[in-house]
Image (cartoon, rainbow, N blue to C red):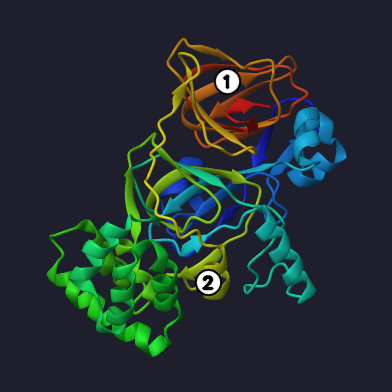
Amino acid sequence: MISTIAYLKNPVQQYAWGSKTMIQSLVGLDDLKGTPVAELWMGAHPKAPSMVQVNGNKWLPLNEVIKMAPFEILGKDVVTKFGDSLPFLFKLLAAKRPLSIQVHPNLDQAREGFERENALHIPLDSPKRNYRDKNHKPEILCALSPFEALKGFRRPEEIIHLMKQVIPSHLTDQFNKFCSDPAGQLRDFYSFIMTMERKQQKEAVEELVSKAERCIKKDVAFKWIIRLNNEYPGDIGVISPVLLNLVRLEPGQAIYIPAGELHSYLNGFGIELMANSDNVLRGGLTPKHVDVEELLWIVDFRATEVAVIEPESVNTKERSYVTPAREFLLSVVSLKKGDKYKSPQNRSVEILICTEGELVIQDNAVTRPLNRGQAVIVPAVVSDYRVEGAGVIYRASTCQRGVPV
């Protein structure tokens, strides 16, 4: 049981697309400099739970500690709404290379997929597993550096304009059908692209890239086709920039990814907050498991407009990123020398990470330094806490329609 603010030790994921410097420099992982580190997880997902300091010197997995005292750590309202597990997963994400083209399931799809793969006796740690839990995975990505991503399908007229300039001959007939009924044929057009025989896909990519090189100055999408092919030669996923919206975030801006939205994070450093899940369906641009059939079942084929989320002011020191998600709320607290911040008393479980500066956080029982790269959990049983110093904190909490639980 933890009854005060407690430090966290957080596991990292060393995926091939990760940066060799970003997370290492922020958190102080000197032994991993020069090695790709893609993510740092702060939470209680059973795949890689944080370790929490208990009784001053003992470190235990956070998911196990929560099970010992869910009401005290999570809070009554959180347990009532989400059960006895932390409803969110908080991450640092550092993309030096583009991530896979991917999509996340909704709750019903996740539960059905999880049970189906269990019935097939696919081990939870199998690289061929799609569903590692029963949860959905809406998420928000907030940029700490300039950040580029692909997010949702473009408007049909944009797809047609861009595709006409680079269309491979293998796709001409299907593309003409799409042009005749863009809204009704997008699913068929994309499914045809993704399910072509591998030989045809490689030939189509070769022609696509050749035409993109001739159009490179006309649109940034063509530059990304070439770059993606350099990273993943011959992968049909390199066509994605002419089908999906390209978005560039400046530090402090964010995007929300709902269930079913096809996306890829291309480059940059950010804070990510999501429902507590590791369910990912991949369609390409990755050495990991790809399941095109399952991805096509999950994808939402409606065109989307990219909505960049700017933080809303809560007070002079705090801003929040409001999304439709029930499980989480991302906030940022920025303090200058001499500033003091006091948390609201109506609060539940929170995880905080300092991304800049040197701070001190205290409740009625303990006072703890909170410096750049350090993370803490504040259990619900802590009535309130104070922060002093100069720095920036990103905070994960729970919410209901933008209002903290």
Q: Is residue 54 visible?
A: no
In this rendering, the answer to whether 114 lies above or below 20 is below
In the picture, measured across the screen, residue 218 lies left or right of residue 360, that is left
Looking at this view, is 60 or 164 the one in front? Answer: 164
Q: Are marks 2 and 1 in contact (CB under 8 Å)?
A: no
In this rendering, the answer to whether 264 lies above or below 189 is above
Q: Quarter of the image containing the N terminus? A: top right
Residue 297 in the image, given as x and y percentages of width and height: 56, 67
For badge 2, the amino acid type reads: Lys
In this rendering, the answer to whether 385 lies above or below 276 is above
Residue 10 in the image, given as x and y percentages of width and height: 62, 46
Residue 88 in the image, given as x and y percentages of width and height: 65, 42
For label 2, the residue is 288
Image point (80%, 40%), residue name: 66
- Nearer to us: label 2 or label 1: 2
In the picture, measured across the screen, residue 193 lies left or right of residue 328, that is left
User: Which of the 4 image quadrants contains residue 230?
Assistant: bottom left
In this rendering, the answer to whether 105 lies above or below 187 is above
In the picture, measured across the screen, residue 41 lies left or right of residue 52, that is left
For badge 1, the amino acid type reads: Val
For label 1, the residue is 360
Image point (18%, 69%), residue name: 165
Dot 2 or dot 1: first in sequence order is 2
Separation (CA) of disc 2 from disc 1: 41 Å
Image point (37%, 45%), residue name: 306
